[in-house]
Image (cartoon, rainbow, N blue to C red):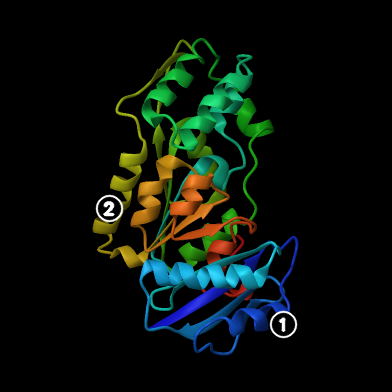
Amino acid sequence: MSLVATLICNPASPALDSTIVDGARAVLPSPGPAQWLFNEVAVDIPFESQDTDRDAVKAIEARLHQARGDLPIDIVVQPRIARRKKLFLADMDSTMIGEECIDELADFAGLKAHVAGITERAMRGEIEFEAALRERVALLKGLPVSVVDEVLEKRITLTPGGRALVMTMRAHGAYTCLISGGFTLFTNVVAAKIGFQENRANQLQVADGKLTGEVVEPILGRATKLATLVELMESFDLDDIDTLVTGDGANDLSMIQAAGLGVAYHAKPAVAAAAAARIDHGDLTALLYAQGYRRNEFVEG
């Protein structure tokens, strides 16, 4: 079967050269010529393998990682067929943005460290997401809803490469959806800035201009994220191979594992270990290189 290994590094720290590429080719079965997607940043190495089950692919990845050494280079191995995906679902907090919105809200209540600790445990899968969300939201009771605008303006940073990722995929016919266990007060703004066609998240209850400490039920969590992927696949008559999903936390894992290309992005250890692909070093343009896009194909606007 025709496979491809893509070596990717952060464009802010180019680390690829011909020596590294030659070392990677040396451990691949029947490798073809390397194809640069962006000099020193991303390269495809096509190869042939009779054994393509998950264990075999992981073994190939392990050999590539050994050849890479300690260099900050991500490696994605996958079939060459249907690489360019037609549906993209992405988590928001710590994925498309650098922060956890609920932790930033909690800072205005003097509870950031406490809430961030709960968030971290939930994202690692150590506690149940829905219960953890209710607990954290309850601590925000009485906070002026206007604080959301301040957090968005002063504290939220878009992850580098996110807009290029979304707009390039859209330009090639993909549908994009931001799906978050966070809140619509944030996803509506973030999705518009990045260019997502749709966003889904939880809704905070507000009364008299203040947060009530409650979230509208049912809570959008791990099961709903997976259900959204399935729903959109059916709506656009797509197969799982046509889908790309990325996230970092335990509540993203079901949709990541169900996708044609499921990527753990700078993820919690358990999520990174269970995902078919992981990006630990690159920015979000890594997900374009993983689909075989060349740098001169990126759409920035």
Q: Residue at x 58, y 89 (%)?
A: 33
Label 2 environment density (alpha carbons within 10 Å; few <14, some 14–19, many ≥20): some
Q: 61 or 168, which lies in front?
A: 61
Point out residue 133 in the picture as x, y percentages from the top left corner. Answer: 43, 25
Element assignment for label 1: helix
| Residue indicated by mark 2 | 230
Residue 169 position, x and y percent, is: 48, 64
SS at mark 2 in the image: helix
Q: Position of residue 243 (x, y in %)?
A: 37, 62
Residue denoted by label 1: 18
Q: Amino acid at mark 2?
A: Val
Q: Is residue 296 left or right of residue 245?
A: right
Q: First in sequence: mark 1 or mark 2?
A: 1
Along the viewing direction, whichever of 15 and 174 lies nearer the viewer: 15
| Any part of residue 214 in sight | yes
Q: How many marks?
A: 2
Q: Nearer the viewer, mark 1 or mark 2?
A: 1
Examine the rendered structure and indicate whether residue 109 appears above or below residue 95. Answer: above
Occupied quadrant, residue 202? top left
Marks 2 and 1: in contact by CB < 8 Å?
no
Q: Quadrant of the C terminus?
A: bottom right
Residue 290 can be seen, yes or no: no
Give amino acid for label 1. Answer: Ser
Q: Quadrant of the N terminus?
A: bottom left
Q: Is residue 259 above or below residue 4?
A: above
